[in-house]
Image: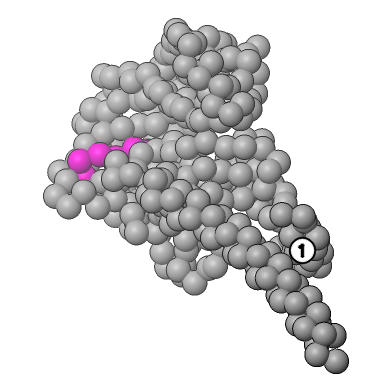
């Protein structure tokens, strides 16, 4: 009885150690991803350094599923720049081009009007009720570069959450069954 | 990595773009009911931007903006016309057009005012870093009186 008890205990302890090992590995992967994300935020000076294009309003330049790299500097905002902005009351940021700029002499404050390249009219209909212009604090960053197609992963996972669960499940399975 | 190399090769290109803009007519020049000056004009725009295209260029987004200073604003940039040039063959062109977007001042500063017309181009790559430049054409001015 004692011998069996000892064997069971030693088996349990091996499994426990393996499990702990894998939990730590998983934790490391998640933490590394987080560190990279935060570092990107730091380097690009923007709250969300990468965004996925969700609509066709900037086609043919940017298509749904493209990834945009953002950078925010203190440089003044100028016509032609592609900016990412939030409208009060709307969750999803919009990526459009600046078509009008009026910059104040004294304060350097700026009135900005934007428009999607593929839209007929400017963005005044998208702004908040009674709002005619965007100001600096609405703007989260400028688009400085892009990668096509890569963002589709995010879109699919958002619009069909079941794929997200399948992916996480598969990842979890991979970590547990790996020999390391 | 490929993204970086693609962008690097774009830096090796030394382009020689050219442009000319003529104001053919001031269609009308009024003070709006809300009080701001507004003008409608017709322009002849010609340009050769073919040298800006590289193997990594997806399209050029080009626009003409009127740029001027007023007592209240150190800079006013108003886009008057824009276009997308999808290929090198379309980058040498001539167009006769009135302003696509309304040219409205913040105030009543336009009478007799001098302004620049700037042709901007924004290069959208197939992949990688976007960059932009412009040609500034000076010496334009509004009429002294509304019409």
Report the magenta residues as a range: B73-78
Position of A52 with respect to B104 (left or right) is right
Q: Residue at x 65, y 18 (%)?
A: B87
Q: Is residue A52 shown to the viewer in this render?
A: yes
Q: Please name the residue that numbered disc 1 is placed on.
A: A176
- Mark 1 chain: A
- Residue B77 falls inside the magenta stretch: yes
Please say if B49 is above or below A67.
Answer: above
Percent of width and height locating residue B61: 54, 29
Q: Position of residue B10 (x, y in %)?
A: 52, 17
State which quarter of the image contains the C terminus of chain A.
Answer: bottom right
Residue nearest the viewer, comparing A143 with B47: A143
The part of the image, by quadrant, that contains residue B95 is: top right
In the rendered structure, the answer to whether residue A35 lies left or right of residue B6 reads: left
Q: Secondary structure at mark 1?
A: helix
Query: What's the coloring here?
Result: one colour
The main secondary structure of the magenta stretch is: strand
Q: Is residue A99 left or right of residue B116?
A: right
């Amino acid at each position: 009885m004692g011998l069996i008890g000892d064997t069971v205990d030693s088996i349990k302890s091996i499994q426990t150690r393996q499990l702990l090992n894998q939990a730590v590995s998983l934790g490391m992967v998640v933490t590394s991803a987080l560190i990279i994300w935060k570092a990107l935020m730091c380097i690009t000076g923007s709250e969300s350094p990468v965004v996925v294009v969700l609509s066709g309003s900037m086609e043919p330049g940017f298509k749904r599923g493209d990834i945009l790299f953002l950078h925010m500097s203190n440089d003044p905002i100028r016509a032609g720049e592609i900016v990412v902005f939030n409208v009060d009351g709307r969750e999803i940021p919009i990526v459009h081009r600046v078509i009008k700029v009026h910059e104040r002499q004294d304060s350097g404050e700026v009135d900005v009007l934007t428009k999607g390249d593929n839209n007929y009219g400017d963005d005044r209909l998208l702004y908040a009720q009674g709002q005619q212009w965007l100001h600096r604090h609405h703007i989260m960053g400028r688009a400085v570069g892009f990668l096509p197609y890569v963002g589709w992963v995010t879109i699919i996972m958002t619009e069909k959450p079941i794929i997200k669960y399948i992916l996480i499940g598969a990842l979890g399975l991979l970590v547990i069954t790996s020999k390391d | 990595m490929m993204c970086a190399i693609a962008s690097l090769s774009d830096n090796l290109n030394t382009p020689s773009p050219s442009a000319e803009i003529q104001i053919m007519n001031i269609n009308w020049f009024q003070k709006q009911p809300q009080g701001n000056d507004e003008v409608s004009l017709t322009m002849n725009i010609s340009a050769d931007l073919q040298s800006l295209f590289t193997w990594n260029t997806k399209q050029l987004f080009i626009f003409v903006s009127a740029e001027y200073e007023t007592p209240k604003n150190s800079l006013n940039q108003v886009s008057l016309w824009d276009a997308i040039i999808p290929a090198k063959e379309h980058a040498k062109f001539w167009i006769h057009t009135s302003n696509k977007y309304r040219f409205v001042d913040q105030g009543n500063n336009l009478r007799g005012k001098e302004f620049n017309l700037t042709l901007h181009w924004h290069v959208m790559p197939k992949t990688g870093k976007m960059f932009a430049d412009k040609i500034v054409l000076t010496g334009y001015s509004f009429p002294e009186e509304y019409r």
